[in-house]
Image (tube, rainbow, N blue to C red):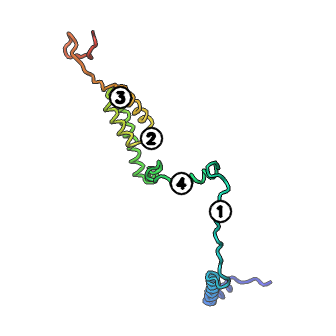
Amino acid sequence: MAKMDNSNFMNRLKANVGLWFIIGMVLLLLVRIVMWTMESGASGGEVVSPIPVKLEPKMNPETSLDYIKVNKLLTPWKDFKDSDLYLLAQYNMFDPKLVQNADAMDRSADEKVKQAKDLFDRGNLQQARELVRQGLMQKPNHLDGQNLLKSIDAALAKGATAVTSATQPRAGVAGTTQPLGAGR
């Protein structure tokens, strides 16, 4: 068997490149013609669609769990804007500005809840309630804020009022004060 010279083969291929191009284009044209005839349905008859048949359920709709589940699935869902997932859908975790803004809002909500806790401990229930509500508006699922708001509402329901640190001067010592009722 004679060894084929690569340079001779490449020279012959380059000399006939126009012929190979024309053969390739004719083959592509033939494939396209076959595809067109298959799409147009020239090779087959008309497709007959089946007649739809109404199926009656063989089970009692009130007692069948399958029927109840399917019926529940087919009932319309509540609007997406009213759902819990709406806020999640609005938040784009791949946008760095939104992530930074969300982190800043979380820190701000945490700070407001801490301030509200301090006010609650000092007895300023109305101001504490306002601050904790502002924090919960920024971060609605803040667990400490929700618990603090429940505690504040319970304290307000008991009739507790905001206690201010009303003071009176101490007897005998100038510039010092003591709470009302102390020292008696």
* Figure check: 147 above or below 17: above
Q: Residues within 10 Å of mark 3 (few under 14, many from 20)?
A: some
**Residue located beneath label 2 in the image:** 141
* Contact? badges 4 and 3 (CB < 8 Å): no
Q: Position of residue 59 (x, y in %)?
A: 67, 53
**Residue located beneath label 1 in the image:** 55
Residue 172 circle label:
none
Q: Distance between the Cα atoms at labels 4 and 1?
A: 20 Å
Left or right: 59, with 92 as reference point: right
- Residue type indicated by callout 2: Asn
Placement of the C terminus among the 4 image quadrants? top left
Left or right: 105, with 13 as reference point: left
**x 68%, y 86%: residue:** 8
Label 2: state its secondary structure: loop
Of residues 9 and 183, which is closer to you in this image? 183
Q: Nearer the viewer, mark 4 or mark 3?
A: 4
First-in-chain label (1 vs 2): 1
Q: Is residue 60 visible?
A: yes
* Figure check: 133 above or below 79: above
**Residue located beneath label 4 in the image:** 75
Q: Nearer the viewer, mark 1 or mark 3?
A: 1
Of residues 173 and 126, which is closer to you in this image? 126
* Figure check: 98 above or below 23: above
